[in-house]
Amino acid sequence: MKKWICTLCIVLLLGLVSLFFLPSYLSMAANTQDVEITIPQGASLYQVSERLYDEGVIRSRLWFRYQGKISQADRNIRPGAYTFSPDTDLEEIFTLLQKGVPEQPVIMTIPEGFTLYEIAQRVESLGFGLAEEFIKATQDYFKSRDYSFDTSELYFEMEGYLYPDTYHLKKNQDMKAIVHSLVSPIDAFFSEEYIKRAEELGLSLHEVLTIASIIEREAYHDEERATVSGVIFNRLGIRMSLQIDATVIYGLGEGKEHRNRVLYADLETPNPFNTYMNTGIPPGPIAAPSKASIHATLYPEDHSYLYYVLGEGGHVFSETYQEHLKHVDAYRRRINQN
């Protein structure tokens, strides 16, 4: 009899211990390392419990469902890609499932010197839509603003007005919003000082961006920007054609194709951006200029250079054509040796 009573007491004691400790045990995470699980749209409490149990996150499917019901967490399970750490208990799991995972932004980087067409391709590659749709959105944006420059010879109206930078965009952001995000920094960048300086130089915003885009494509490194700018202004000052290869390349490809070399025949191919055949500034930008190139446009280096050619580690600048020819000859010899 005493033995039976003793056994009963032990069973009751174990039952009380289990009743006290079991809920805590079942509420503890079962995983020993981070587990990533994607919860689909419309998943039920039952489906979530099965998935979490199969992945080793929870210890009991029944206990999970029971706790989900009494806490009413089953009414607001949000879809998303979740990461469950080993120290996460059921209460934290339910809080996370109800709160949802913050939407991760799509990071889009536009390098300095990208053309509008290249930007459109970048937008398409990130899944926002077709490149043609982005180009159409830039055209719609242009029509909605009161820009006063002539567009008859431009391939893309908003070329040069989309600022090169890194953008954090929403996953399903529409084209109109993306275009607005890329244009806004240009508007904000032009301070009263820059606007006044452009007026002093007799330049419109469109002309500033045009020259800046040329500097962006021509300068070999940052220290050259103001020097290249000085060459451009020196040539404009004596009504000498700019003779810049980057503009010829842009015109030949109509803003869509890029090549590394320019042939002599290309220099004689008529197009609005051929600065060998046409004098003055081209009709518009040829790429997205950086802040540094815009600054160099507004504050060109004061010198007497009229020519430059690529040397070792940068461009070599010359004041006379005879001096320039010597540097060109040295450049050709170096190319032939390589």
Image (cartoon, helix red, strand yellow):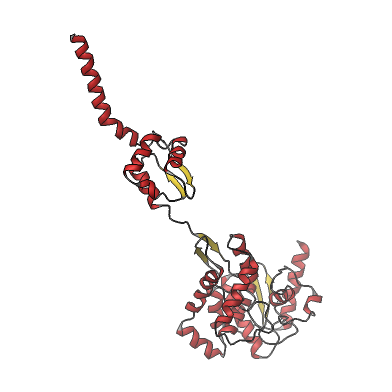
Give me the residue at 52% from left, 70% from top: 177
Q: Is residue 304 visible to the viewer in this orientation of the structure? A: no
Question: In the drawing, does residue 301 fall left or right of residue 65?
Answer: right
Question: In the drawing, does residue 333 fall left or right of residue 214?
Answer: right
User: Foreground: 79 or 285?
Assistant: 79
Q: Quadrant of residue 67?
A: top left
Give me the residue at 67% from left, 91% from top: 238
Question: In the drawing, does residue 24 fall left or right of residue 52?
Answer: left
Could you tell me residue 296's position as x and y percent? 55, 79
Q: Quadrant of residue 160?
A: bottom right
Residue 231 versus residue 180 in the image, above or below: below
Residue 204 versus residue 292 in the image, above or below: below
Q: Residue furthest left?
A: 2
Give me the residue at 62% from left, 63% from top: 124
User: Foreground: 289 or 300?
Assistant: 289
The quarter in which the C terminus is drawn is bottom right
Q: Is residue 124 visible to the viewer in this orientation of the structure? A: yes
Could you tell me residue 104's position as x and y percent? 47, 56
Report how many numbered discs are placed on residues in the image: 0
Could you tell me residue 174's position as x and y percent? 54, 67
The quarter in which the N terminus is drawn is top left
Could you tell me residue 200's position as x and y percent? 52, 90
